[in-house]
Every structure is written in structure tokens, then in C-alpha cells.
Image (cartoon, rainbow, N blue to C red):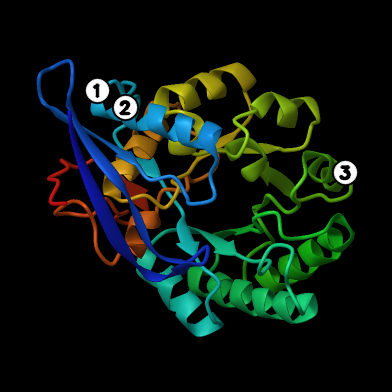
Amino acid sequence: MEFRPFSVRLTTRFRGLTERSGVLIRGVGPDGADAWGEFSPFADYGPEQRGRWWAAAMEAAHGLLPAPLQSDVECAAIIPELDPVPAAALASAYGCRTAKVKVGGPRGRDPDPAATLRADCARVEAVAAALGSGGHIRVDVNGAWPLSAAVASIAALESAARAGGIDGIEYVEQPCASIGDLAALRRRVDVRIAADESIRLTGDVDAVVRAEAADILVLKPSPLGGARAVVEMVERYGLPVVVSSAMESSVGLATALAAALALSEQPFAHGLGTGTLLATDTVAHTLAPVAGRLAPIPLRVTA
């Protein structure tokens, strides 16, 4: 096997990052052709989390991705915590009918939550207006809200989406950090709740399902052990699923896409539009949505 360190730049700051780095792994698939995996865990990941990411990279580098059931999938735009005008411009540039808008500010260290919520509402309204009638908005909080603030925050963001011309919020992703708080919030609001970090950081979907903490599972193949592991989770739990990337280069994104393609059609657009946020990439042609849909392309690795 061959191992190639890489670093790629992002077009805008995302989760506090302006670049992503890791190692590409070239192996050989069952058909004798080159196969590529990506190992790019976030710096704060521990040994167990890195181990799952390594398993995903090796699965791809051995060409063991699941067989597709679809030729392409609908995917969502992803809008970082930008000011309203650039957020709306990015939503329009994507060409997707669904956008995931980052909200909530810095988890656990926001000096002015009221100002953050006002900025979040302005961003959501601007993106809703850019999408227009028939568009869909979901918001991703990354666990930043305390339970005590979550109900009012959701109501404010729903009002902002309606002010922009969209009928409310499709779902709220990881509004609170703990599974217990997710479950409690889900009982208090009408909007759907999706779990991401509660699954991604532990690999424990069972705990989320047992607690009835989520209506939707957000599954990221790289942190969860690979595309086949995600397909098995979908078959086991039966809840609606959004397959999402972990802000990888196009090599890692291809693993996430393989998982989504191996599923039956899901009711919500997948979170696979992150290639648009790459200023540089590990391949000649970035894996990015066209007219709101993402299809596999040959990966000509240049890193």
C-alpha cells in the first residue's frame, strides 16, 4: 500500500478550520484496480474515534465499498456561519433545493447568546429567501444550545425561515450536547430532531434509539467505521437517515457517497455537498453536486 500525506484549503472557515489534512491510502481493489481511502480524523479525536476512521479508510483502500442501488442522490448545500449576504450567495451558487445552515455559535463559550441567535435568524432568513418557495432549510447546532434555550431558539429560527418564504425548519441537527437533553427537547417541540455528534463521537446508535432522542439519524461513514457499517446501521434501526461527509477531501467524500448510493431513496437530502467548500483538493475534479444531485466520478488523485 502507498501512503500520501495531504493538506487542502477550504473556501471559508468551517468548525474553526481553514484547511483539512490527513493521509491518502492507495491500495488494490478486488478487480485489481487502484482503490483509495482517506484517513483525516479531526485533531480532537481520541484513539477509539481514530480507529473507526482508520477502518473506513482501509475499507475504501481495499475496494470493499458496498454496491450501489442508485446512480446519484439528492444532497444539501452546507452554509457555514456567514453573514446573511454571503450565506445567501453561497446557497444560490450550490443549486440545491435544501440547505443546512450552521447556527449556535461556539459550543459552551458563547459570550453573547442573544446576539448569536439574532445573527443565526438573519442568516436563516437570507438563505430561505435565496432558496425560494419549495426550498428546505435544516439547521445544525453542533450541540451548542443548553436545553433551557433550545425551545425558544427553535421557535425564533422557524419564524426566520417563514419570514424568508419557507414553511419552517425541516429538522434541527444536534441542538443539545447530551442524549438526555435531545430526548427531553424532542418531547417539547414539533420540529424533527436529528442526532449527529451523539452518534459520531461514540459510534453508539443504540443509545440514541433507546432514548427516543432523534427522529433522524445523521451518519458519517468515515467516523463510524466505513460505508458498509453505515448501511448495516440503516438496516438495523429503520429510522430515516441522512448520510453526511466529515469535511473530507473528495477521496473521503467518495466513501460517504458510496454509503448513500447503497441505500434505498431516503426522505431527506443527504449532507454530501461539502466538496463545494474545498478551495483545493486531492483529485483533479472535485466531487461536487450538480443541480442539487451528486453522482460518482472517476477519482484522478493528484495529491
Q: Are marks 3 and 1 in contact (CB under 8 Å)?
A: no
Q: Are marks 1 and 2 in contact (CB under 8 Å)?
A: yes
- Write the residue at 54% across / 72% down: 127
Residue picked out by circle 2: 58
Q: Is residue 29 above or below residue 289?
A: above
Q: Earlier in the sequence, mark 3 or mark 1?
A: 1
**Which residue, as the protein is rendered here, is positioned at the far front?**
47
Report the amino acid beneath label 3.
Answer: Ala
Task: Name the disc covering residue 184, or none.
Answer: 3
For the residues carrying marks 3 and 1, which lies nearer the camera in this image?
1
Residue 187 on image: x %, y %: 88, 43
Residue 46 on image: x %, y %: 55, 40
Give the image quarter of residue 29.
top left
- Write the residue at 65% across / 38% down: 216
Question: What SS does tag 1 mark?
Answer: loop
Residue 113 vs residue 74, the one in the foreground:
113
Task: Name the disc covering residue 161, or none.
Answer: none
| Marks 1/2: CA–CA distance | 6 Å
| Marks 2/3: CA–CA distance | 38 Å
- Crowdedness of circle 2 by 10 Å Cα count: few (<14), some, many (20+)? many
Residue picked out by circle 1: 62
| Marks 3/1: CA–CA distance | 42 Å
Q: Is residue 21 left or right of residue 199?
A: left
Question: What SS does tag 3 mark?
Answer: helix
Question: What SS does tag 2 mark?
Answer: helix
Q: Is residue 212 left or right of residue 266?
A: right
Give the image quarter of residue 169.
bottom right
- Write the residue at 13% across / 17% down: 31
Residue 109 on image: x %, y %: 73, 69
Q: Is residue 289 left or right of residue 2?
A: right
Q: Earlier in the sequence, mark 2 or mark 3?
A: 2
Report the amino acid beneath label 2.
Answer: Met
